[in-house]
Image (cartoon, helix red, strand yellow):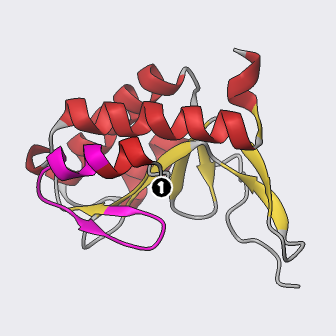
Amino acid sequence: MAKTKTTYTGVDVLDFINSYVDNEQKKADSFRLIELMQQWSGFEPEMWGPTIIGFGNYHYKYASGHEGDAPIIGFSPRKAAFSLYVYSETERSKLLITDLGKFKMGKACIYVKKLSDINLSTLQELCIESIKYISEHHECSCRVK
């Protein structure tokens, strides 16, 4: 079975942004996302894998037997767009996503070019819904709050 690449690394988040993000708007949006996700989740930002900034953690286990740990919510400031890891496929999330703004949906994440393209209140609600879903369905650091 393949080893999961998305694991906690201990790399300093601010060092990562300052060295990896070369666009000033994306850098400002990254710092804003850190501030917001930290506030919404109650967790400090931590690096997961080489490019994901995550908040909190949970343990997952699939029917296939594959298991591991992942951040509860997070994002990556990739060159083309931000990858937002904030979506759990619940009925409420499906309704909320229609009010998010300009984005593309991937299999496990939402792609956003810049924060001004989306409704931050809707993003907050999506994050809260995802935290709630993960806390109800997985072993999660969000339960001990």
Badge 1 crowding class, 10 Å Cα cut-off, few under 14, some 14 to 19, many 20 or more, is few
- Give the magenta range: 95-110
Identify which residue is drawn at 46% across, 35% down.
129
Let me know if residue 90 appears in the view.
yes
Front-most of residues 142 and 64: 64
Q: Judge left or right: residue 130 versus residue 114.
A: right
Question: In the image shown, does 35 or 143 lie closer to the viewer?
Answer: 143
Residue 14 located within the stretch drawn in magenta = no
Q: Residue 45 placed where, x, y %? A: 55, 35
| Image position, residue 2 (x, y; %) | 82, 84
- In this rendering, position of residue 79 left or right of residue 87: left
Secondary structure under badge 1? loop
Q: Give x and y (percent) for residue 109.
A: 42, 63
Q: Residue at x 37, y 39 (%)?
A: 126
The three-letter code of the residue at mark 1 reads Glu
| Residue at the spot 27% in from the left edge and 43% down from the top edge | 96
| Location of residue 121 by image quarter | top left
Q: Residue furthest bottom?
A: 1
Instruction: Name the residue carrying label 1.
Output: 89
Q: Residue furthest top?
A: 145
Question: Is any atom of residue 57 visible in this view?
Answer: no
Quadrant of the rendering where the C terminus is positioned: top right
